[in-house]
Image (cartoon, coloured by chain):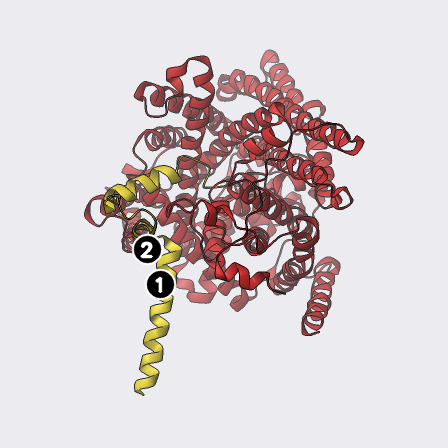
Amino acid sequence: MLKKISAAVLAIVGAIALGAVALHRHEPINALWIVTAAVCIYLLGYRLYAAWIAARVLSVDASRATPAERLNNGRDFVPTHRVIVFGHHFAAIAGPGPLVGPTLAAQFGYLPGTLWILVGAVLGGCVQDMIILLLSTRRDGRSLGQMARDELGPLGGFAALIGTLIIMIILSAVLGLVIVNVMKHSPWATSTVLATIPAALIVGLYLRRWRPGRVLEGSLLGVTLVLLALLAGGWVDHQPLLRPLFDYSAIALAGFVIAYGFCAAILPVWLLLAPRDYLSTFLKLGTVVLLAVAIVLTHPQIKMPAVTAFTDGTGPLFGGKVFPFVFITIACGAVSGFHALVASGTTPKLITNEADVRLVGYGSMALESFVAIMALIAATLLDPGVFFAINSGAGVVGASPAAAVHTISGWGYPVTVEQMQALANAMGERTLFARSGGAPSLAVGMASIFGSTFGRGLLALWYHFAIMFEAVFIMAVLDAGTRVGRFMLQDLLGHLWQPLGRTSWYPSVLLASALMVGAWGYFLYIGVIDPNGGVNILWPLFGISNQMLAGIALSVATGIIIKSGKARYALVTLVPLAWLALITTTAAWQKITSADSRIGLFAAADDLARKLASGVLPPERAAVAPQLIFNQRLDGWITMLLLTILWFVILDMARVCVRRLRGLPLRSSSEAPYQLSRLQSALAQAQP
Amino acid sequence: MRRAAQLLGRGAAVIWSWLRAASGDDAYERYRAHQALRHAGEPPLSRRAFYEDTQRRKWSGVSRCC
């Protein structure tokens, strides 16, 4: 009874808050409305929908022994308390994605992004994560690719592998581009980010050599070191002699990021990757909590309109209408296929009890979605003019500050050069114009929230803290992505020539790492030389690949649900799958066929080729045009490949389902047989 | 007063043990306990060897996301 009352209260409060968010027009809305609506919707989804799915669709059985219990080896397979697994899983899935995507999507106004983040998470992303987590737990922690192969067929498995490899490459490139845009000609940001590398090395040595495995001590040491690096960066910024040493162009920084990625992939994990990950996890959790507290304390006004004129597809951050592009731009935070890889990797090996998947799978994703909501708030509390001035590439609004403010003010979002200069001064930067990629504007937003909570005098420090936080995050993903990509490539190459498949054979390590870094380094380089900022092309491509991966995960889930004789519940995964297939196909189709050069990749290539041939391009743009033309065509082909993979897997799943419904023979389920749990906690939960 | 201090101390100890479990700080102790229980005959790995091996296993698969 109490449960029903509290659910009803949540529903009423949530409906009021959401109504306020959706119907507010022509005056600024307070961010607390959005926060309240979000929290109520997550809680309702968790209490009602997730519980129903767990009981009916998945038949979660608390008495069934999980792999952590059956295969307990005291190392990867360890029964762990659900709150701790929740923490591990959240730390693993939450990356820079939910920070960047919502910031970029803010060009449509705050409403489209907010609605998609909430609805997409509660009905799509959280459901996907929870179901894949349970399916993998029932299959001894097998990966998404293995499950696709076992349950659908070799085609599904191969498609998942290729899809994963492509997404790793594009993700690394776009994140590399984001930090290059943060660091270019910013000695404070560059010196701080650089200093995190020796900090990670020191922690690495500490954790292996001096105090092996003392993770808390090591992390504390690391966090202290990077905070010192942050202060030192501010000092360096004021030293005329040191300043030029850290003042680099975007190209030079791209070279540095590529070299760093290569080193991280070939060095032992304990030296750089593992300690950096501990640092990033601590900073991540700390900052997320700090941001939530600060937003509630300051309850800022949202200055961005609910819906801007750019829903018609003319937005400066990236081209394309609100449908389908808001759904592509915000992947992490609403639905992220990448999560299916984590939910079918480390996490299922820690689950003590099947009933824990609701908190760990559904709950973690709801929290990540909340991070996306906070990023959206931080981006939309800026003056819209300032937001567009920071995020628009020089190729779109004009290269000089005067030209940029003229263009942006002409759109109806007034901003002045003096305002931007004052803001840059307050943030300790020389300029904030054309810092596309989402991270700098997010940092300005976070700095203003933190500044008004904890003291305005420290704005520059908060800005660079936010920058460092994002950079540490992103470099941790670059390291890990390159390394996993290296293993996958070695696996593939091993089929061509057996020795290349040996993960510890040094020539093979070097070759696979170089191929992987070369692949994302290429896209990073092109993004840097692109006068439109590069993010406008790469981020939608990343979104399409991430949604494609979610399509694969939901296909696997649908196939398994129907095979298990629960076709009547298959809508739970079929509806999000159909929606993802629709938006991914529409977006990919527009990217391939649109005649508008702001959207269509081939159209943009042809347009640029025409301009190059007729000699209207200024010399510096003509010099890079051939590379840009080639790259846009390449991106077009990659988009086609992603779309093909998605539909192959969907059709393969449909084939399996039709066979099942007709009663034809199928691959048998790869589920591990039932075994009664002997853990007391599990038995206690299983009692009615 | 003494009782309050005791309660406070116990609370701090609980938080500390949760923090250690969440960060993986106590992984080696858990491993040793497991070895002692299930594989009493075998010599356990040293702290350093265990740490290196754990990291290698952790980072051979997808354990970080976007």
Query: Which residue is tagged 2?
Result: B26
In this view, which residue lies farthest toward the right?
Answer: A662
Q: Position of residue A217 (x, y in %)?
A: 27, 55
In this view, B54 is above or below A161: below
Query: Which residue is tagged 1?
Result: B17
Nearest to the observer: residue A88 or residue A608? A88
Report whether A181 appears left or right of A653: left
Crowding around mark 2 (Cα neighbors within 10 Å: few <14, some 14 to 19, many 20+) is some
Q: Amino acid at mark 1?
A: Ser
Nearest to the observer: residue A406 or residue A102? A102
Which picture quadrant has residue A197? top left
Rendered yellow, the chain in question is: B
Rendered red, the chain in question is: A
Q: Amino acid at mark 2?
A: Asp
Residue drawn at 60 percent across, 18 percent down: A633
Disc 1 to disc 2: CB gap under 8 Å: yes
Residue drawn at 66 percent across, 51 percent down: A59
Disc number placed over residue A182 in the picture, else none: none
Label 1 vs 2, first from the N-terminus: 1
Residue A609, can we see it?
yes
Residue drawn at 74 percent across, 62 percent down: A19
Quick one: SS at disc 2?
A: loop
Report whether B27 appears left or right of A493: left
In this view, A550 is above or below A448: above
Crowding around mark 1 (Cα neighbors within 10 Å: few <14, some 14 to 19, many 20+) is few
Chain letter of mark 2 equals: B
Alpha carbons under labels 1 and 2: distance apart: 8 Å
In this view, A480 is above or below A684: above
